[in-house]
């Protein structure tokens, strides 16, 4: 059984998902396809990287991951189609800054620029169908990925915005909002604890004061906000049985100030 995952910004109303799945089922025997998400925001590599990093890295060895978000090659922007080998899994995608976010701080085994696999179509508008499926089939049949192109030493670099640290203040940014309206901040619990040590902290927002972490949503009354730690280890603002983004007036890019009390 060959596992192939799909992550894209295609949505679910067009033909793209069906076309790619049909191609994979036709070219890979005993193929099992896992849909990670097709609701990545259009061309949003930050959103795509966050989903892939937190959903795909622990699949079984030899899993093939096809990622189609802003996947067109571009000589102007130095975007190349690549295969990335990590933890004995294969990620077929475009080096557009998104892979560097996915694998930030992780040890990649190999990066190959796809220069020796040629798509059948002369149009370059649907990379997942015209090239990534073919690449996945060759990987599935144990072809050495070194034969697919040229080795690369590094990926095109893109980084998440970092929190700004002052003497008694940390300014974070909302970088992701999930479908529940939970708000993810661009700081992990480890980073936060390293910054504040044993000091107390406070977040004031929409008339509420948050001064501690909660381990579950139901530790506060319904429709009340809380600060917790998400499964991704990022700090998260949430509302018990409510939408924190809507009720607290927060969007991606919104600043959050955390006061540190000496």
Image (spheres, rainbow, N blue to C red):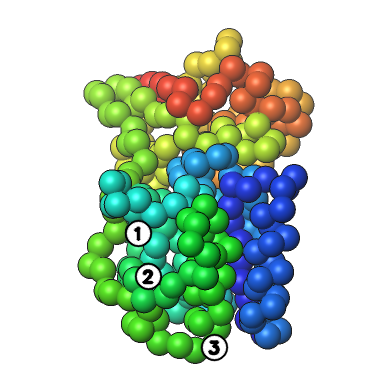
| Secondary structure of the residue carrying numbered label 2 | strand
Q: Residues within 10 Å of mark 2 (few under 14, many from 20)?
A: many
Q: Earlier in the sequence, mark 2 or mark 1?
A: 1
Kindly report the distance in space between the C-alpha atoms of the residues bearing marks 1 and 3. Answer: 23 Å
User: Mark 2 against mark 3, which lies toward the viewer?
Assistant: 2
- The residue where tag 2 is placed is 114
Picture coordinates of residue 77, whole percent (x, y): 30, 46
Residue 141, compared with residue 188, is above or below; it is: below
Q: In the image shown, does 46 or 115 lie closer to the viewer?
A: 115
| Nearer the observer, 228 or 9 | 9
Residue located 66% across and 71% down the image: 23
Where does label 3 land, which residue?
141
Circle 3: element type: loop
Q: State if disc 1 and disc 2 touch (CB < 8 Å).
A: yes
User: Does any portion of residue 88 appear in the rendered image?
Assistant: yes
Disc 1 secondary structure class: loop
């Amino acid at each position: 059984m060959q596992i192939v995952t799909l992550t894209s910004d295609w949505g679910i109303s067009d033909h793209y998902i069906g076309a790619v799945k049909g191609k994979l089922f036709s070219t890979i025997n005993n193929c099992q396809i896992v849909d990670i998400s097709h609701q990545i925001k259009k061309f949003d590599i930050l959103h795509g990287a966050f989903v892939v990093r937190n959903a795909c890295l622990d699949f079984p060895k030899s899993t093939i991951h096809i990622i189609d978000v802003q996947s067109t090659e571009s000589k102007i922007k130095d975007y190349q189609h690549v295969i990335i080998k990590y933890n004995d899994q294969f990620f077929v995608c475009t080096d557009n800054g998104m892979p560097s976010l996915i694998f930030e701080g992780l040890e990649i085994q190999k990066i190959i620029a796809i220069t020796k696999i040629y798509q059948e179509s002369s149009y370059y508008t649907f990379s997942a169908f015209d090239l990534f499926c073919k690449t996945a089939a060759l990987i599935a049949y144990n072809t050495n990925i070194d034969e697919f192109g040229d080795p690369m030493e590094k990926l095109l670099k893109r980084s998440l915005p970092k929190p700004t640290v002052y003497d008694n203040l940390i300014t974070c940014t909302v970088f992701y909002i999930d479908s529940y309206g939970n708000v993810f901040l661009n700081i992990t619990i480890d980073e936060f604890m390293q910054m504040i040590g044993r000091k107390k902290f406070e977040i004031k927002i929409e008339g509420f004061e948050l001064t501690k972490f909660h381990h579950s949503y139901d530790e506060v009354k319904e429709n009340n906000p809380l600060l917790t730690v998400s499964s991704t280890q990022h700090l998260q603002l949430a509302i018990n049985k409510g939408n924190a983004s809507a009720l607290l007036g927060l969007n991606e890019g919104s600043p959050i100030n955390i006061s540190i009390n000496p």
